[in-house]
């Protein structure tokens, strides 16, 4: 039985294009994997905490020595890491915010990049092996794709690929959904193209 971990990082509900597309991906994936399990994390609407001083102290010390505050701070991270390690596939709905990921997604990343759990130190070897990821990135503007005019401003997909690769997830597919602030016709065309890409990827 396969497990899909779906992350949504838009704070928007039904208006969110990335969320509509992660929904379509999930639906198609469930048809292709009738016995599969979907675990959903709504980072946009129920954000995970930012790291704190207690979190940092706990992440880099022996659990046997943790204070009650440190135990509480690292418990969320342990749960999120366990959830990631238990998944076979990761699906990330990622709006572009100011050329990069929304803070809600960055907060999740800070919680799951953990020494001894998702990467090894000092070798910097990723410990999250045997998983694939799909990123669905929604943008108001256009031209950020590889080789396009705004590509140099995209600090989102290159960053997500780097950090996923760092923890060991190197098989990453990306669906770019641009021009969402364009005319109805342009937006519709962009969404239809993305829907077809999403359905193909989810049915793999
Ligand atoms: C705070 C904020 C920052 C944004 N920054 C960018 C940006 O840098 N580039 C861009 O093309 N669109 C930008 N947008 C537009 C969003 O990427 C676009 O509305 C996208 O559809 C949001 O995802 P969602 O529909 O899943 O909520 C921004 C939107 C917001 C609210």
Image (tube, helix red, strand yellow):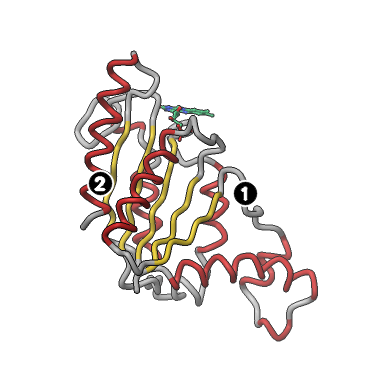
Q: Position of residue 7 (x, y in %)?
A: 47, 52
Image coordinates of residue 77 in percent, x first then y, are 60, 66
Residue closer to the observer: 27 or 48: 27
- Label 1 packing within 10 angstroms: few (<14), some (14-19), many (20+): some
The reply to whether the residue tagged 2 has its Cβ within 8 angstroms of ligand 1 is no
The residue under label 1 is 47
| Whole-number angstrom distance, CA of label 2 to CA of label 1 | 28 Å
In percent of width and height, residue 98 lies at: 48, 31
Q: Quadrant of residue 52 in the image?
A: bottom right
**Residue identified by numbered label 2:** 199
Question: In the image, residue 115 lies at what x, y percent?
Answer: 52, 72
Residue drawn 40% across the image and 19% down it:
181
Q: Quadrant of the C terminus?
A: bottom left
- The residue closer to the viewer here, 32 or 116, is 32
Instruction: Work out whether 128 lies above or below 132.
Output: below
Q: Residue at x 36, y 31 (%)?
A: 153
Disc 1 within 8 angstroms of ligand 1 (CB): no
Q: Quadrant of the N terminus?
A: bottom left
* SS type, badge 1: loop
Residue name at image x 34 percent, y 15 percent = 184
């Amino acid at each position: 039985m396969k497990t899909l971990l779906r992350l949504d990082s838009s704070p928007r509900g039904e208006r969110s294009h990335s969320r509509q597309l992660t929904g379509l991906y999930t639906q198609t994936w469930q048809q292709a994997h009738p016995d599969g399990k979907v675990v959903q994390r709504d980072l946009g609407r129920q954000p995970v905490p930012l790291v704190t001083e207690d979190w940092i102290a706990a992440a880099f010390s022996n659990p046997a020595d943790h204070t009650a505050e440190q135990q509480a701070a690292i418990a969320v991270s342990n749960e999120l890491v366990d959830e990631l390690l238990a998944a076979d596939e990761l699906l990330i709905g990622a709006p572009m915010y100011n050329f990069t990921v929304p803070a809600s997604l960055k907060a999740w990343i800070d919680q799951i990049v953990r020494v001894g759990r998702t990467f090894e130190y000092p070798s910097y070897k990723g410990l999250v092996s045997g998983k694939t990821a799909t990123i669905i990135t929604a943008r108001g503007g256009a031209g950020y794709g590889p080789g396009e005019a705004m590509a140099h401003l995209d600090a989102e997909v290159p960053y997500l690929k780097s950090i996923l690769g760092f923890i060991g997830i190197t098989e990453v597919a990306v669906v770019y959904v641009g021009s969402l602030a364009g005319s109805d016709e342009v937006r519709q065309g962009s969404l239809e193209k993305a829907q077809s890409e999403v359905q193909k990827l989810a049915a793999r």
